[in-house]
Image (cartoon, grey):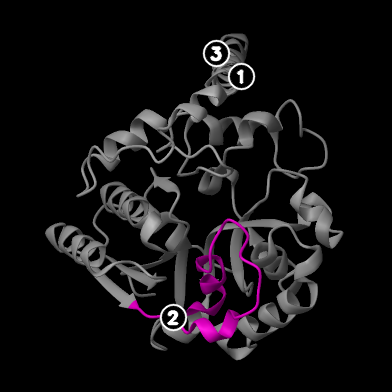
Amino acid sequence: MNRRIHVAACCDENYAPYVAVMMLSALSSTVDTPITFHLINCSISPESINKLQDLIARHKSTLEIYQPDDRLYRGLPTLRYGEAVYQRINLPEYIPTDIERILYIDADTLVLGDLNELWQLDLKGHLVAAVENLSPRACKDIGFPRTEYFNSGVLLIDLDGWRRESIHKQVTDYARKNAHRLQYVDQCSLNAVLRGRWLRLMPGWNQQSDIYKVLKKYSEGGSYSRESMEEAILNPKIVHFTGKKKPWKVYCFHPFKTQYKERLNTTPWENLPPPDGEFKVYLKYYFALRQRWKCHKRQSAVKKFQRSKTHHDT
């Protein structure tokens, strides 16, 4: 297998600063393996494109830009996510055919682990490797048990397999027929088409924000062990800031927010003002602080449990 890692992302102008964080954190965390980034440009401004290209070039890496064919998804609902959510479906049509696999990573992430470990994974004939979706809500739209439904924020994709089976067409057709009843149209459509054909990754490769609820609120119905969840909380490989409380917002109190902001300030968008700086947002502050306290208690409880377990074993 080619040692060069190929990482794909899709975003619009609003998420340009945050895809820069994903890329920089991937470069910082991945040792002795070159990375080529493939970015689907969903209306990113020329100025931001130049910033991204200069940034990646300064880190002696490569950034390829692709212009998507928006006609493929015309008429499909985007809700608050924008058209970028559909572009990952069509990655095999953009990426050169000599590239056999691609690692897709959402823009709202922070990479903390060496991607080479994931890149070298044997897919064992599966079309994609992913992490189970930790919230039990999304899978209900298509009637799947939680253990059979993955989160599409981090995907190791067999491009040859997707091309061979026209997965992008199957997923798009499903989305058009069922969009009216799906909360997460692209993710649910991917799951419907790829049911039984995905390889489960350990939860640390896509540490979703719901992980802080899982051990208490969502403990039933998932497939991961308590030990693997605790490891993902303490030592995540990729932190995925799922939900509305993003780390660039005032009312986010995610445990990795500080680390995220530090990385953001190493990009051309350093000291970027939060998009939710207006007064009305501070009304949410109290509730967000409560949620942060719950996350802190969960991390503390996990660490305390592991210390007591270690002491008992000795």
Q: Is residue 127 left or right of residue 39?
A: right
At 74% from the left and 25% from the top, the residue drawn is 216
Nearest to N terminus: mark 2 or mark 1: 2
Name the spot of residue 103 as percent of width and height, x first: 45, 65
Local crowd at mark 2 within 10 Å, few (<14), some, or many (≥20)? some
Q: CA distance from mark 3 to mark 1?
A: 20 Å
Residue 33: image location, x then y, percent: 27, 61
Secondary structure found at label 2: loop
- Confirm or deny contact between disc 2 and disc 3 (CB under 8 A): no
The answer for how far apart the CA atoms under marks 2 and 3 are is 50 Å
Q: Which quadrant would residue 65 be assigned to in this image? A: bottom left
Name the side, left or right, on which 298 lies relative to 140. left
According to the picture, the residue beneath numbered tag 2 turns out to be: 68
Amino acid type at mark 1: Lys
Q: Within 10 Å of the Cα at label 1, are there few (<14), some (14-19), or many (20+) other Cα atoms?
A: some
> In the rendered view, does 22 fall on the left or right side of 296?
left
Image quarter (top left, top right, bottom left or bottom right) of the N terminus:
bottom left
- What residue does disc 1 label? 294
Could you say which is closer to the camera, residue 122 or residue 25? 25
**Element at badge 3?**
helix
Q: Earlier in the sequence, mark 2 or mark 3?
A: 2
Q: Which mark is residue 307?
A: 3
Given the image, on which type of amino acid does mark 3 rest? Arg
Range of magenta residues: 66-91
Q: Is residue 7 visible?
A: yes
Residue displayed at 45% across by 27% down: 279
**Which badge, 3 or 1, is on the more N-terminal residue?**
1
Does residue 236 lie above or below 184 as drawn?
above
Marks counted in the figure total 3
Q: Is residue 253 visible?
A: no
| Amino acid type indicated by mark 2 | Pro
